[in-house]
Amino acid sequence: MTKPISVHLGRRLLAEFVGSLFLAAVVVGSGIAAQNLSPHNIGIELLENAAATAVALYALIAALGPVSGAYFNPIVSIIDAGFGRLLWRDVPWYVITQVIGCSSGAVLANLMFSTSAITLSTHNRASGAHLLAEVVATAGLVLIIFSLTQSRRADLCAAAVGSYIGAAYFFTSSTSFANPAITVGRMLTNSFAGIAPSSVLGFIAAQLLGAVLGGLIVLALYPRKDNNANFSTEVSP
């Protein structure tokens, strides 16, 4: 990916909105499709959901990275600003756009499968194990992205992020949301991919903690701050 600093903010925000919308539509839509195609088979449903998300992440990051950085995730935007590659004054616009995009994508997925545009999820995920999993998932995502960018291998981010999130669907009990924007969006669908509103704040708090831990690990591994390195992102779901 290349720096988006020279790209007009409006174009960057459009890319973030489109990417966040498609990301949420893929996560929620593939979850609904998995329920329809493989009813009562949770393992296959999870595999279908994870595979669709991993492949879509690769495609979206590769396509939109040159315009906006392809963050689709408030945490990644904030941390990249901390590393000096995104202007702090642009961060609030990125975060708002990502949340609106992910929420719109969830609504779009609901409509594509002939369900109510907004149906709040009843899927409670706020156990201690789920929250610990979100800390781990988010720390790992931050580690993957910023280890690559700090070592000037940002061109690998699309494949690495897609691969990591696909794997994290299975090795974390939370199925690796690792993204506050997608967490809010997934609250709007009472489907396989949904999360109950009562679980959202806990998830976001766990994600923020994971982001801090992941950032500290990156700083320990790559202590030299390099403002000239390329950068990229994810999303996780």
Image (spheres, grey):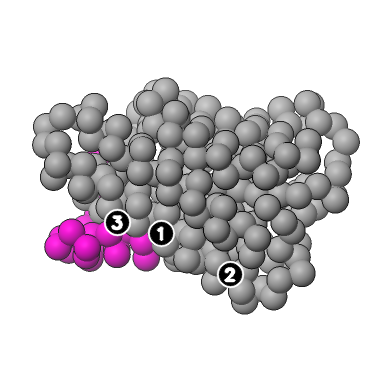
The residues colored magenta run 103-124
> Considering only order in the chain, which callout, 1 or 3, is on the residue closer to the N terminus?
1
Numbered circle sitting on residue 33: none
Instruction: Find disc 3 in the rendering and name its residue.
Output: 188
Instruction: Find disc 2 in the rendering and name its residue.
Output: 13
Kind of element beneath mark 3:
loop
Mark toward the viewer: 2 or 1? 1
Numbered circle sitting on residue 22: 1
Q: Are marks 2 and 3 in contact (CB under 8 Å)?
A: no
Kind of element beneath mark 2:
helix
Mark 1 surroundings within 10 Å by alpha-carbon count, few (fewer than 14), some (14 through 19), many (20 or more): many
Mark 2 surroundings within 10 Å by alpha-carbon count, few (fewer than 14), some (14 through 19), many (20 or more): many
**Residue 230 visible in rendering:** yes
Up-down relation of residue 116 to residue 164 (above or below): below
> Considering only order in the chain, which callout, 3 or 2, is on the residue closer to the N terminus?
2
Between 168 and 79, the residue placed more toward the observer is 168
| Percent of width and height locating residue 17 | 50, 66
Tell me which corner region of the image, top left, top right, bottom left or bottom right, holds residue 211. Answer: top right
Between 144 and 196, the residue placed more toward the observer is 144
| Percent of width and height locating residue 50 | 36, 37
Q: Is residue 121 magenta?
A: yes
